[in-house]
């Protein structure tokens, strides 16, 4: 496919923004918003594998996720948590990455079932992605084949505690270390892999653009987008938009 | 209006547009997608888009020992895993010429029928949710959980049990456990009238489901439809009776049929099967209580050096989705030479769903998919 990519070890510890850079009001706002955020979580309803069968009991009357303030949500843009329930085939992983990039930060990824940790039952399968954290920043794994609803709820409660303390920041890693994630994605999907979202632009917007955001892999992506002139794709839409505005005048 | 102010409205050549229905969609059953071409809300064409759950089972099974595959096969269909291990075990027993004890066969029927009840409750719930009736979904999932508790007490696993092995079953079931199952069946029988009131006799459901996704007997036969979907067309075919395996020939049960062939009929068949399954489990409990033998499996060779004699076999069982078959070829080695799985859902969710959805309306897509009870992991395997 292409040259061997140096697979770096995935350092899940986030580079915490030093608190000294924020003044006391900002810190108070952060604490308050983390408190609120942990008590109102929306889980994206995307069933990728077997583990999805244990979510209906966890969500409905017997185990009742809603008493913790967690509800299923059907659209990625309004969701906070992306639950990857089980093995992720390569075809699904493309959709998962597209979905993840549509979600608005702060966003959290939970890998349920052993298959997301190391391939699990399908470690020798040609069709599945083995380690999820190579492609997306994962906040928490819930191991088991499959984990019981109690385990899912315990995992979610631990995530709530993490959010409240302000420690669940691995979504920032996707911007800070985009080159690493993109490299692994390219390794799987080929050099032409690209998504509609401009992650580097978003990284600058969130002030998360760092030294590891760019590298050989992002250079390959930028070269591809410039060569194929992907920026032109939405040009007709823009023209149409300006025409309608002119018509109104 | 002055002529110079008038601008003729120009429509595009066609109002049709393509809509991706899934894989991340609340109305789709699992990780599966349909590409539908719609004109307004009328569906002009539909194309099934599977492969999101493909793991390559048939290849994976060739790389594992015969005993390791017992843990792998139930993963083929997640909501109803017991028939998978059952069908695999029947195939290996056929190749090895095992004499399975009588008690083991009855214990297996107990598992199969409880699994069928659980799968049907789950399907009702899903179908009810697609027509906007969420209470029934909550009830169905809660009642299914009680059966999962029984599974856990009997086998140690909630969803995947690996209880049936070639040559017999792993554990015996005691009298106390049978009493608990008996109590659960009493409870479920009481609940059936509640389900009738809430769902099956509900005007909302009947009006939505009647004449939706009609399947004629001729179409059903030519498209490879099996199971409750076939019986809803009026054709009383059931592997349990017509090609009896285990001890189904000693059990008294009716084959539920309907004649309309629409989404309503398919659900009513499942509703009748639920009552039949409860009736079957009661007979099994009676037998197991009377039977005093403790012999639950025959002698099997050392599992780590287990060589199955060369040969090929085709076994089939009736799962809650339809006819499930395994074609197993052995060359006398420690691993299967070739395994082919014939899952019922791969017919229902691809060719049948595409054709039933076409010409219908967008809001009925989810309903038709749930009424066919297609299981995406089994489609892709």
Image: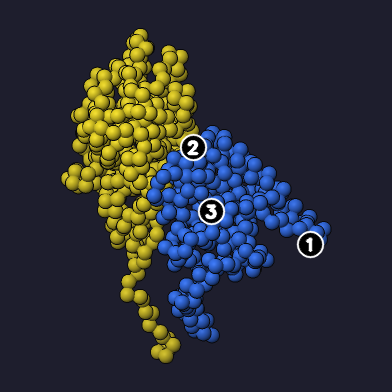
Chain colours: A blue, B yellow
Residue drawn at x 64%, y 58% as measured from the top left:
A172
Mark 1 chain:
A
Q: Classify residue A23 as left or right of residue A70.
A: right
Could you tell me how far apart the alpha carbons at marks 2 and 1 are, in whole angstroms? 43 Å
Mark 3 chain:
A
Q: Classify residue A235 as left or right of residue B363.
A: right
Could you tell me how far apart the alpha carbons at marks 2 and 3 are, in whole angstroms? 22 Å
Nearer the N terminus, badge 2 or badge 1?
1
Q: Label 3: which residue?
A: A134
Disc 2 packing (10 Å; few <14; some 14–19; many ≥20): many
Q: Considering the image in quadrants, where does the C terminus of chain A appear?
A: bottom right
Image quadrant in which you'd find residue A18? bottom right
Residue drawn at x 43%, y 33% as measured from the top left:
B160
Nearer the N terminus, badge 2 or badge 3?
3
Q: Is residue B81 visible?
A: no
Image quadrant in which you'd find residue A69? top right
Q: Nearer the viewer, mark 3 or mark 1?
A: 3
Nearer-the-camera pick, A235 or A217: A217
Whether marks 2 and 3 lie on the same chain: yes
Q: Label 2: which residue?
A: A146
Query: Residue B100: x, y in percent?
Result: 29, 20
Q: Label 1: which residue?
A: A21
Mark 2: which secondary structure? loop
Tell me if label 2 and label 1 are in contact, CB under 8 Å: no
**Residue lying farthest bottom?**
B4
Q: Considering the image in quadrants, where does the N terminus of chain A appear?
A: bottom left
Q: Nearer the viewer, mark 2 or mark 3?
A: 3
Could you tell me how far apart the alpha carbons at marks 3 and 1 are, in whole angstroms? 31 Å
Disc 1 packing (10 Å; few <14; some 14–19; many ≥20): few
Judge whether B205 appears above or below A188 on screen. above
- Mark linked to residue B19: none
């Amino acid at each position: 496919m292409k040259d061997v990519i140096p697979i770096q070890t995935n350092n899940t510890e986030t580079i915490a923004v030093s608190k000294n850079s924020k003044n006391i009001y900002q810190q108070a706002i952060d604490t308050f918003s983390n408190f609120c955020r942990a008590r109102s979580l929306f889980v994206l309803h995307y069933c990728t594998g077997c583990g999805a069968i244990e979510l209906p009991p966890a969500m409905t009357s017997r185990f009742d996720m809603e008493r913790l303030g967690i509800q299923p949500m059907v659209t990625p843009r309004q969701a906070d948590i992306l639950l990857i329930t089980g093995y992720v085939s390569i075809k699904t992983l493309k959709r998962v990455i597209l979905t993840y990039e549509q979600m608005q930060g702060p966003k959290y990824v939970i890998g349920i079932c052993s298959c997301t940790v190391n391939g699990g039952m399908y470690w020798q399968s040609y069709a599945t992605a083995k380690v999820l954290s190579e492609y997306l920043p994962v906040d928490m794994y819930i191991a088991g084949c499959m984990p019981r609803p109690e385990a899912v709820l315990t995992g979610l409660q631990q995530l709530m505690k993490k959010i409240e303390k302000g420690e669940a920041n691995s979504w920032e890693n996707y911007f800070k270390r985009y080159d690493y994630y993109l490299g692994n994605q390219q390794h799987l999907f080929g050099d032409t892999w690209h998504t509609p979202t401009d992650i580097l632009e978003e990284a600058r917007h969130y002030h998360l653009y760092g030294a590891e955001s760019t590298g050989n892999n992002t250079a390959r992506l930028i070269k591809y987008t410039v060569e194929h002139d992907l920026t032109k794709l939405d040009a007709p839409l823009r023209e149409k938009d300006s025409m309608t505005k002119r018509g109104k005048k | 209006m002055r002529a110079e102010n008038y601008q003729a409205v120009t429509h595009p050549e066609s109002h049709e547009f393509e809509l991706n229905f899934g894989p991340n969609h609340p109305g789709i059953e699992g990780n599966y997608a349909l590409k539908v071409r719609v004109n307004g809300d009328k569906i002009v064409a539909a194309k099934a888009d599977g492969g999101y759950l493909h793991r390559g089972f048939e290849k994976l099974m060739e790389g594992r020992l015969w005993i390791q595959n017992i843990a792998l096969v139930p993963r083929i269909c997640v909501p109803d895993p017991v028939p998978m291990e059952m069908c695999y075990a029947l195939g290996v027993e056929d190749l090895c010429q095992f004499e399975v004890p009588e008690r083991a066969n009855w214990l297996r029927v107990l598992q199969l029928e409880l699994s069928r009840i659980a799968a049907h409750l789950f399907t009702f719930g899903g179908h009810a949710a697609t027509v906007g009736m969420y209470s029934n979904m909550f009830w169905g999932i809660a009642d299914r959980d009680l059966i999962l508790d029984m599974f856990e007490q009997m086998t140690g696993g909630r969803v995947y049990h690996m209880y049936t092995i070639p040559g017999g079953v792993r554990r015996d079931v005691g009298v106390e456990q049978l009493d608990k199952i008996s109590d659960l069946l009493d409870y479920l029988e009481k609940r059936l009238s509640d389900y009738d009131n809430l769902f099956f006799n509900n005007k909302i459901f009947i009006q939505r489901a009647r004449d939706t996704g009609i399947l004629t007997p001729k179409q059903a036969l030519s498209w490879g439809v099996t199971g409750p979907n076939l019986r809803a067309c009026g054709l009383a075919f059931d592997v349990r009776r017509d090609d009896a395996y285990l001890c189904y020939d000693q059990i008294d049960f009716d084959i539920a049929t309907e004649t309309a062939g629409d989404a309503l009929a398919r659900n009513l068949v499942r509703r009748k099967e639920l009552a039949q399954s409860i009736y079957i489990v009661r007979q099994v409990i009676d037998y197991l209580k009377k039977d005093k033998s403790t012999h639950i499996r025959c002698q099997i060779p050392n599992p780590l050096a287990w060589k199955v004699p060369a040969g090929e076999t085709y076994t089939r069982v009736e799962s809650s989705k339809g006819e499930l078959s395994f074609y197993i070829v052995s060359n006398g080695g420690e691993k299967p030479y070739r395994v082919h799985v014939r899952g019922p859902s791969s017919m229902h969710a691809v060719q049948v769903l595409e054709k039933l959805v076409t010409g219908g309306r967008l809001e009925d897509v989810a309903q038709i998919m749930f009424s066919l009870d297609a299981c995406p992991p089994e489609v892709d395997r």
